[in-house]
Image (cartoon, helix red, strand yellow):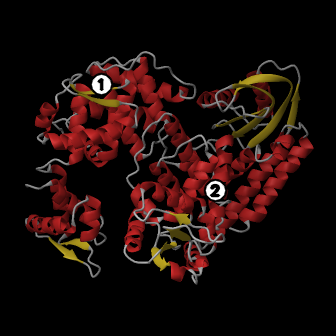
């Protein structure tokens, strides 16, 4: 079957979103004119005739494929196994990137153009795009007259650049290829012209066996990402591109390093390719930045991050005038997501989110609110749009939204109200799609306008008023002007939503009520779970005063020995092992306090336990920021491996309260059992009154 890339894309999009795509949306998605789409649809129609199928339109001009389901299935199977007759720009740029990274130091532009089958002018455009892409990873693409083109940078950065490019633009192709390999279908050609199928199937088997089945199950995109980076590492090493020796491991990846060491040892054995310690560390960093599938695998007691996420939820809620502060599933989901996300940002790992543009279109106000809150709470981090969009999805899910209902209305004031003002208004709506309407007023109309009816006032001249908050821009709307407007909207989300309902609360409440009719048995079960959990924690709670201690592990063992006598633990060694493994993943000392929270989950633990050990002499432990610190209060939190959502919520309640205020920190470090117990009782009572009963 002869088919072009665009024709194949059109068919795939129509099949996936039956009735949703129109000619205009396809032209926007594929970045071509509507006339081009109309022309391609004629070719698509002829192709579909081979399968007794046709392209039809809904009343709203939505495109769908009409015909027997078995023929649609046959069409899909044919599409999967058919390569387009032409190459996309991304495919050519990938080919160019592979040549530059693998085939020598310098290349003449004419030779590169000939290899790609494009003109030197097109090659120049491709090189400009690659310069921009490689720059994100501190890799330089230099062009020297008379010498040629060269890629300069560290090997780790080159691997990140290539791996991220593959995952950003060819993720679906990698998924399809891996699926066919898993089904036993042999593939002779290199995948994407680079990855060896034999290596990929070995890597997939080992990652699945050593990490996915024995450890935490990775999210699909991160699983594919790890497979891609493993294959890339094997092939780069085999081709003589080793990672420089100065790469030094950082604290916090010990557990991931153990896992990747096991994978790499087996890879070296099966493929006869020796992988270095630097290769193992490189892959352990990738694994550390990977997300897991289940939110409840996140640490319910990540104290510092937990506090920041609580503040994030509180800030977004305030901006939108909706209450999400007590939504534990939102908190839990963000806790599981933000840890790997922050690690990726610190390591400068690119994370591509294919839904970013769609999320910004559907939730523009929420996107601005989340962006503002992230910048406020995580001042030392620069969140790209893709990462912000992932966080927006968590909030969107919590708000049960399909699309936002709030409108942003702007007014443009021009000296005459015609000509350039209309051009400016249309440019504003094109560059800032979050603005729903733009009205134009002349200076004469401005005198009698009711500015409280608008969310944004834009003027091309200085206005003779002080009570109106406005932005002055150029009639041609420069990029700087767009930045000013975006910044204003982001800073004033709370003001915008205060005048309008962010959600259709009546309908929203009705839908929630309809979807969540509680089953009395489930309600009674949850009440019992909460009652038993709180009762167990209060019963087992105590403050232990220890004198002349020299080793915190010895102190912990003594506390556990007492717990074993009280039948709270069945295997001290197993619990101690889990505590030590947990410390390897990140320090347990809480910075800017004299407390450390030692916590773990294990099958040997019979019930929830929270106890405080007060030391008369300070001991040194590693803090959550990786630095050594002195502590005088050792907090022990133990739980069984299997926890219900309510049990996790109650433990999270305690851990996030440790540093919620100066008063809380004073209470937990007071060594006064009565005062700390009162604090726990207050927490539990507030939870019962304001969370459980309301639900």
User: Percent x, y for residue 443?
Assistant: 51, 78
Secondary structure of residue under mark 2? helix
Q: Nearer the viewer, residue 272 or 537?
A: 272
Residue hosting label 2: 313
Crowdedness near tag 1: few (<14), some (14–19) or many (≥20) residues, C-alpha within 10 Å: some
Crowdedness near tag 2: few (<14), some (14–19) or many (≥20) residues, C-alpha within 10 Å: many
Left or right: residue 50 compared with residue 6: left
Q: Nearer the viewer, residue 434 or 341?
A: 434
- The answer to whether residue 629 is above or below residue 64 is above
Residue 536 is marked as: none
Q: Nearer the viewer, residue 295 or 68?
A: 295
**Residue 464 location, quadrant:** bottom right
> So how many labels did they put on this image?
2
Secondary structure of residue under mark 1? helix
Dot placed on the residue nearer the N-terminal end, 2 or 1: 1
Question: Residue at the spot x=23%, y=43% of the render?
Answer: 125
Question: Residue at the spot x=19%, y=27% of the render?
Answer: 107
User: Percent x, y for residue 359?
Assistant: 44, 60
**Residue 560 location, quadrant:** top right
Question: Residue at the spot x=82%, y=49% of the render?
Answer: 680
- Which quadrant holds the C terminus? bottom right
- Which quadrant holds the N terminus? bottom left
User: Percent x, y for residue 154?
Assistant: 38, 24
**Residue 673 location, quadrant:** top right
Real-space Cα separation, disc 2 to disc 1, in angstroms: 43 Å
Residue 236 is marked as: 1
Left or right: residue 492 compared with residue 615: left
- The answer to whether residue 471 is above or below residue 390 is below
């Amino acid at each position: 079957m002869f088919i072009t890339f665009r024709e194949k894309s059109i068919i795939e999009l129509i099949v996936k979103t039956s009735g949703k795509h129109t000619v205009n949306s396809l032209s926007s998605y594929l970045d071509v004119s509507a006339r081009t789409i109309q022309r391609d649809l004629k070719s698509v129609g002829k192709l579909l005739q081979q399968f007794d199928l046709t392209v039809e339109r809904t009343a709203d001009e939505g495109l769908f494929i009409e015909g027997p389901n078995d023929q649609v299935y046959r069409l899909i199977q044919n599409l999967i196994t058919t390569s387009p007759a032409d190459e996309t720009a991304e495919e050519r740029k990938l080919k160019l990137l592979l040549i530059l990274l693998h085939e020598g130091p310098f290349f003449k532009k004419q030779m590169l153009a000939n290899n790609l089958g494009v003109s030197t002018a097109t090659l120049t455009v491709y090189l400009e795009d690659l310069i921009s892409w490689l720059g994100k990873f501190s890799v330089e693409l230099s062009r020297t007259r008379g010498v040629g083109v060269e890629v300069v940078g560290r090997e780790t950065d080159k691997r990140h650049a290539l791996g991220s490019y593959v995952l950003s633009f060819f993720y679906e192709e990698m998924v399809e290829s891996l699926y066919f390999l898993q089904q036993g279908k042999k593939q002779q050609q290199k995948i994407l012209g680079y990855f060896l199928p034999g290596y990929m199937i070995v890597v997939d088997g080992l990652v699945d066996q050593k990490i996915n089945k024995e450890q935490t199950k990775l999210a699909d995109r991160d699983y594919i990402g790890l497979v891609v980076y493993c294959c890339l590492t094997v092939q780069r090493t085999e081709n003589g591109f080793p990672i420089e020796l100065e790469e030094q491991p950082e604290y916090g990846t010990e557990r991931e390093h153990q896992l990747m060491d096991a994978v790499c040892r087996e890879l070296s054995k099966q493929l006869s390719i020796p992988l270095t310690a630097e290769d193992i560390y490189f892959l352990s960093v990738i694994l550390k930045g990977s997300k897991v599938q289940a939110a409840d695998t996140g640490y319910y007691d990540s104290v510092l991050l937990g506090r920041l996420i609580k503040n994030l939820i509180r800030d977004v809620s305030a901006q939108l005038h909706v209450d999400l502060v007590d939504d534990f599933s939102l908190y839990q989901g963000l806790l599981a997501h933000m840890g790997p996300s922050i690690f990726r940002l610190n390591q400068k790992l690119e994370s591509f989110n294919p839904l970013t543009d769609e999320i910004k279109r559907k939730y523009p106000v929420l996107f601005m609110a989340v962006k503002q809150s992230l910048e406020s709470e995580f001042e030392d981090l620069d969140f790209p749009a893709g990462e912000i969009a992932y966080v927006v999805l968590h909030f969107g899910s919590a708000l049960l939204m399909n699309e936002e209902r709030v409108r942003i209305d702007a007014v443009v004031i021009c000296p005459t109200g015609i000509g350039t003002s209309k051009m400016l208004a249309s440019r504003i709506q094109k560059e800032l799609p979050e603005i729903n309407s733009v009205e134009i007023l002349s200076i004469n109309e401005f005198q009698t306008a009711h500015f409280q009816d608008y969310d944004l006032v834009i003027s091309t001249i200085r206005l003779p008023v002080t009570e109106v908050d406005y932005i002055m821009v150029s009639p041609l709307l420069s990029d700087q002007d767009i930045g000013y407007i975006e910044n204003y909207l982001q800073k004033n989300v709370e003001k915008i939503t205060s005048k309008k309902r962010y959600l259709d609360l009546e309908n929203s409440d009705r839908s929630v009520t309809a979807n969540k009719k509680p089953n009395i048995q489930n309600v009674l079960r949850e009440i019992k779970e909460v009652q038993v959990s709180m009762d167990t924690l209060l019963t087992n709670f105590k403050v232990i005063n220890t004198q002349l201690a020299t080793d915190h592990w010895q102190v912990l063992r003594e506390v556990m020995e007492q717990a074993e006598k009280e039948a709270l633990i069945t295997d001290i060694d197993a619990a101690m092992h889990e505590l030590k493994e947990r410390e390897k993943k990140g320090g347990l000392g809480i910075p800017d306090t004299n407390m450390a929270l030692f916590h773990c989950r294990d099958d040997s633990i019979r019930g929830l336990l929270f106890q405080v050990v007060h030391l008369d002499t300070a001991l040194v432990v590693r803090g959550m920021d990786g630095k050594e610190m002195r502590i005088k209060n050792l907090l022990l939190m133990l739980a069984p491996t299997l926890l219900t959502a309510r049990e996790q919520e109650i433990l999270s309640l305690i851990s996030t309260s440790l540093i919620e205020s100066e008063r809380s920190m004073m209470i937990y470090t007071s060594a006064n059992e009565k005062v700390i117990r009162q604090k726990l009782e207050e927490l539990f009572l507030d939870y019962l009154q304001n969370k459980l009963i309301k639900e």
